[in-house]
Image: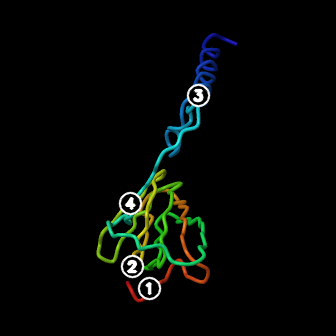
C-alpha cells in the first residue's frame, strides 16, 4: 500500500477513534457522561404549576401513584383536557409546548422537569423536529381520572 493510502486509512481510523471518544452532544444527558461519582440534582421544588397557579392540597385518603409515558410524533397535538389531580414529569426526548386555554405557553425540552396545571384546561403540541418522549407522574386516588377531555374546545 502506498503512503497516500496509509494516510487516508489513518485519517479514517483517527476519525472513528475521535468520534467514539467525543461526547454525544445531541443527547440530552451527554453532560453527565464523564461524572465520576454519584451526584443528585434538584430539578424542581414548587407549590405552583408552570403557569404560576397554586397547587391544590393533597386529597384525603389512600393515594394512588401513577406513572405514564407519552410519545408524541412530530407535528402531533394532544386534545384539550384538564387534570383533576397533581402531576409532574420529566421530558426524556424532544420538546413539547403546553398551551393553556388563556393562551399562556410553556415549552419543555429534553432533560427538563415540568409541573402541570391542575383544573385548568390545556393541551400539548410537538412543534419540534423530534418525537417527544415524556414521563409523567400523577398523585391520585383509586377511581379518580387523571385527565378529563374537553372535545368542545377547538
Crowding near the residue tagged with mark 2, few <14, some 14–19, many ≥20 C-alpha atoms within 10 Å = some
At 42% from the left and 58% from the top, the residue drawn is 108
At 42% from the left and 56% from the top, the residue drawn is 45
Quarter of the rendering occupied by the N terminus: top right
Tag on residue 150?
1
Q: CA distance from mark 1 to mark 2?
A: 8 Å
Q: Earlier in the sequence, mark 3 or mark 4?
A: 3
Q: CA distance from mark 4 to mark 2?
A: 16 Å
Lateral position of residue 72 relative to residue 48, left or right: right
Q: Earlier in the sequence, mark 1 or mark 2?
A: 2
Q: Earlier in the sequence, mark 1 or mark 3?
A: 3
Crowding near the residue tagged with mark 4, few <14, some 14–19, many ≥20 C-alpha atoms within 10 Å = some
Residue 68 found in image quarter: bottom right
Tag on residue 121?
2
Check whether the beta carbons of the residues at disc 4 and disc 2 lie within 8 A of each other. Answer: no
At 43% from the left and 73% from the top, the residue drawn is 57
Residue 23 found in image quarter: top right
- Point out the residue furthest to the right here: 1
Check whether the beta carbons of the residues at disc 1 and disc 2 lie within 8 A of each other. Answer: yes
Q: Which residue is mark 3?
A: 21
Q: Earlier in the sequence, mark 3 or mark 2?
A: 3
Residue 58 spot, x, y in % from top left: 48, 73
Q: CA distance from mark 3 to mark 2?
A: 47 Å
Lateral position of residue 144 relative to residue 108, left or right: right
Amino acid at each position: 500500500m502506498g503512503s497516500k493510502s496509509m494516510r487516508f486509512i489513518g485519517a479514517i481510523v483517527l476519525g472513528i477513534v475521535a468520534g467514539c471518544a467525543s461526547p454525544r452532544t445531541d443527547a440530552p444527558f451527554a453532560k453527565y457522561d464523564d461524572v465520576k461519582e454519584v451526584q443528585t440534582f434538584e430539578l424542581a421544588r414548587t407549590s405552583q404549576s408552570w403557569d404560576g397557579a397554586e397547587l391544590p392540597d393533597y386529597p384525603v385518603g389512600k393515594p394512588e401513584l401513577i406513572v405514564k409515558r407519552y410519545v408524541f410524533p412530530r407535528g402531533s397535538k394532544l386534545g384539550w383536557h384538564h387534570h383533576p389531580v397533581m402531576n409532574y414529569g420529566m421530558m426524556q426526548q424532544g420538546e413539547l409546548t403546553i398551551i393553556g386555554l388563556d393562551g399562556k405557553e410553556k415549552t419543555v425540552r429534553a432533560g427538563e422537569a415540568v409541573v402541570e396545571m391542575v383544573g385548568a384546561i390545556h393541551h400539548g403540541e410537538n412543534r419540534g423536529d423530534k418525537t417527544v418522549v415524556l414521563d409523567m407522574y400523577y398523585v391520585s386516588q383509586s377511581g379518580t381520572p387523571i385527565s378529563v377531555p374537553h372535545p368542545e374546545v377547538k
